[in-house]
Image: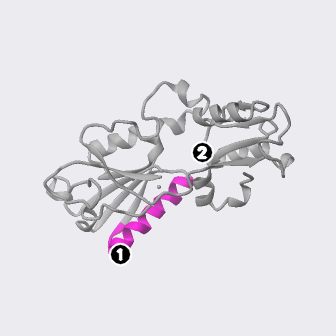
Amino acid sequence: MLSMISSLQPSKVIAQNAMCAESLKDPARKNTIKIGSRKSQHIVCNSVLLLLLLLLLLFLFLQLALIQTKHVIEKLKELNAEKTYEIVKMSTLGDQILDKPLPKIGEKSLFTKELEIALEHQDVDFVVHSLKDLPTALPDGMCIGAILKREDPRDALVLHAQYKGKSLKTLPKGSIIGTSSLRRTAQLKRSYPHLKVENIRGNLNTRLNKLDKGDSYAAIILAAAGMTRMGWDNRVSE
């Protein structure tokens, strides 16, 4: 599920069913809203979007992030087709450190901190994240401005070609399943104790390449929504 995080100036904007970002104090920027995005569907926060002619969308330059960013832009254009959008490239610590499991990195807001800093400095006016990447408590002065319609919330099994036609139940004992999620790891170990679970990091493309070109993983677990957005539903086995 995708969410939009905005800075707060309560007197400027009335939101519908959500708290919204407000226009910036700097008069020179009154016709510009800058947006930042990581990873998201029905826009409910529209008042702020009607204020400006140029919206600058900040996002992490990954293929999936680009697809999701364009999806957000499409939804915004449904509200006002006259507005224009510029996509700005950015990455976060979570995208840069790929040799450690996420829980062992020891940092908070791995996929949001850099974007939050850009928002705090008013380099952007709001950012787009996957809701799962957000911290439990947002930084002071920031709020969830809108949430898009939810995509498929399920996990997906993607198999190495060698195991085509198999399922988690029928994979051979000791088969290695790749995931970086503690939740998925716990579920796999509980439900399929005959399998081994090992860490795998990287964006969607990187993980699929590790699966397809290597011989370590029998399968990997990915978000079904991401596979759908990339147009790779045919790779999903379960």
Residue 164: x and y, percent?
84, 51
Q: Which residues are drawn in magenta?
A: 63-84
Residue 42: x and y, percent?
41, 64
- Position of residue 25 relative to residue 220, above or below, is below
Q: Amino acid at mark 1?
A: Ala
Q: Residue furthest bottom?
A: 81
In three-dimensional space, the C-alpha distance between marks 2 and 1, rounded to whole angstroms, equals 31 Å
Q: Amino acid at mark 2?
A: Asn
Residue underneath mark 1? 81
- Position of residue 191 relative to residue 167, above or below, is above
Task: Kindly indicate the quadrant of the structure image that contains residue 176.
Answer: top right
Residue 146 circle label: none
Please tell me which residue lies in front, 43 or 51: 43
In reply to whether residue 138 is colored magenta, the answer given is: no
Residue underneath mark 2? 203
- Is residue 66 left or right of 50 when viewed as pictured? right
Local secondary structure at mark 1 = loop
Please give the name of the residue rendered at 46% of the width and 40% of the height, measured from the top-left corner: 111
